Image (tube, grey):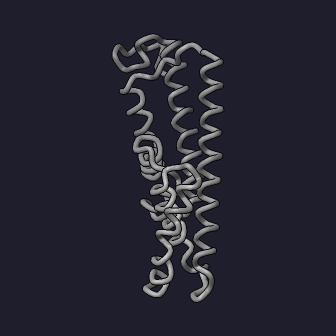
């Protein structure tokens, strides 16, 4: 590991210079590049061209960031063009109850990704899970939460406040 770090460190100033040319936040690009390089350490062959390897990673990071920003801009433009009626969010008590029905792993992955706003890679690192596991568990957890909240919403629409637990009703116990 020490030899790997010794090969990378001399190229930091070069990376910063290259990152500035991309017009993005140079420090963020360099940081993400080094993070990806460290994650891929076992694929790097000591003594090979570290400068070219790091430059390629930097380029890929910059392209990915550019694509993400372009996608975000398109999404924001689409949302701005297509106004929609506001969606009524479920009361907090219903969300807490729906979360309580989920398993521990589902709650963990939802909390990190959706509440804390972590990226998939960060969630995978925090939970020590493969990223594919994070993606599939998050998908299933979101679906289960959505289904649970949908059942509560339809029950609330059918039974009024009885579904919220405020006034139990014999006709709405099912």
Residue 47 lies in what quarter of the image? Answer: bottom right
What is the number of callouts on the image? 0
In the rendered image, residue 100, in percent from the top left (x then y), is placed at 40, 39
Q: Nearer the viewer, residue 166 or 68?
A: 68
Say left or right for 95 vs 75. Answer: left
As displayed, is residue 75 above or below residue 38?
Answer: above
> Please, is residue 129 above or below residue 168 in the view?
below
65 with respect to 113 (left or right):
right
Quadrant including the N terminus:
bottom left
Nearer to us in this view, 167 or 68: 68
On screen, residue 107 versus residue 65, left or right, reads: left
Q: In the rendered view, would you say 2 is above or below 143?
A: below
* Residue 69 image offset from top left, x and y in percent: 59, 41
Residue ID at (65%, 18%) = 82
Q: Quadrant of residue 127?
A: bottom left
Q: Residue at x 59, y 50 (%)?
A: 65
x and y, in percent, of residue 90 in the image: 45, 23
Q: Which quadrant of the structure image shows residue 115?
A: top left
Residue found at the very far left of the displayed protein: 166
Q: Between 95 and 30, which is closer to the camera in this rendering?
A: 30
Q: Please determine whether, in this image, residue 139 is positioned above or below residue 171.
A: below
State the residue in front, 12 or 66: 12
Residue located at (64% from left, 39% from top): 70
């Amino acid at each position: 590991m020490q030899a790997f770090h010794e090969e990378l460190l001399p190229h930091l100033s070069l990376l910063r210079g290259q990152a500035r040319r991309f017009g993005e936040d140079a420090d963020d690009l360099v940081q993400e590049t080094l993070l990806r390089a460290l994650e891929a350490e076992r694929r790097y062959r000591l003594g090979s061209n570290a400068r070219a390897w790091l430059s390629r990673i930097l380029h890929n990071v910059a392209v990915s960031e550019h694509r993400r920003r372009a996608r975000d801009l398109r999404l924001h433009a689409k949302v701005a063009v297509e106004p929609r009626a506001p969606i009524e969010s479920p009361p907090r008590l219903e969300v807490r109850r729906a979360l309580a029905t989920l398993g521990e792993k589902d709650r963990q992955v939802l909390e990190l990704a959706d509440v804390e706003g972590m990226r998939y890679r960060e969630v995978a690192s925090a939970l020590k899970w493969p990223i594919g596991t994070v993606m599939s568990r998050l998908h299933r957890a979101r679906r289960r939460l959505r289904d649970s909240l949908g059942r509560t919403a339809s029950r609330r629409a059918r039974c009024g406040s009885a579904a919220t637990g405020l006034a139990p009703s014999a006709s709405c116990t099912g």
